[in-house]
Image (cartoon, grey):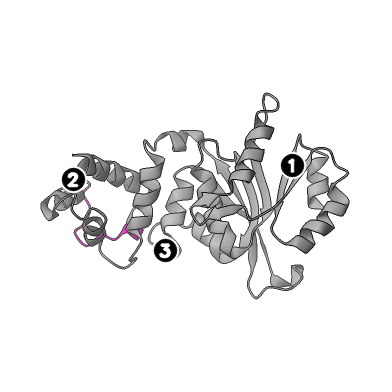
Amino acid sequence: SLTALMAARVAAVITVEIDANLYRLASEELDRLDNVRMLRCDVLKSKNRLAPEVLQRVDEQLGAAPGRRFKLAANLPYQVATPLISNLLALDRPPELMTVTIQKELADRIVARPRTKDYGALSIWVQSQCRAEILKVMPPSVFWPRPKVNSAIIQIKLDKERRSRIPDRTFFHQFVRSMFFHRRKLLRSELLSALKGQTDKPQVDAVIAAMQLKPTARAEELSVGQMLDLCERVRALAGD
């Protein structure tokens, strides 16, 4: 199996399986491998939180010897992929590299550029911290059971310089998601909704003007750098 192949090349593997039958089948092969730790649980505690037992195992293995590096290799179901990738990037010590198989639709969203239909909060959140690249697109015929959509292998590599430019990651993450709650609304309207009770229309208009944005601008038009700039201006307003 892929897990066994990885185990032969790395210091430790933590594998997570929620299905009882698949866990039992995998155990028959992996129990003999000393550097594999199997967990039967959901990798997510909730939509916005990773399972504590998974994070505990990761921390234990990272601290077991100097120089260990955290990497993710996985075939991710659609409903798990977005919250898993997003929550991992919210950690103080996220994976240095994520190589995952996901639905191509989701991969397109991760690497999307501004002013395209796929560009959104996930694109900005990942690209603000990482370099992402689609390595391979795979048709349904290469899987069993066969899905109804294409899949893609995507590589997401942490860029520490990019990450260091975000003063408050928690605020930025929440801010970016709020800017895309209603995708077709004007940026001005999204800002007023997100900052309801914390600022007023003249202040929001002043921020938009200071960034030399059009009054009709929408969130999907802003680059990652512009969204970071906007976030910090808004954070200053919210803190006043």
- Chain-order first, disc 3 or disc 2: 3
Q: Position of residue 20 (x, y in %)?
A: 75, 61
Which residue lies at the image location 62% right of the left edge and 46% below the top edge?
98
- Magenta residue span: 212-220
Which residue lies at the image location 70% right of the left edge and 28% below the top edge?
64
Residue type beneath disc 1: Val
- Chain-order first, disc 1 or disc 3: 1
The residue under label 3 is: 116
**Residue 13's disc number:** 1
Q: Position of residue 15 (x, y in %)?
A: 72, 48
The residue under label 2 is: 210
In magenta stretch: residue 151? no
Residue with the most extreme left position: 202
Q: Position of residue 132 (x, y in %)?
A: 55, 49
In the image, taking residue 156 as reference, residue 138 lies left or right, namely: right
In the image, taking residue 148 as reference, residue 180 lies left or right, namely: left
Answer yes or no: is residue 158 visible: yes
Residue with the most extreme bottom position: 148
Q: Callout 1: few (<14), some (14-19), or many (20+) C-alpha neighbours within 10 Å?
A: many
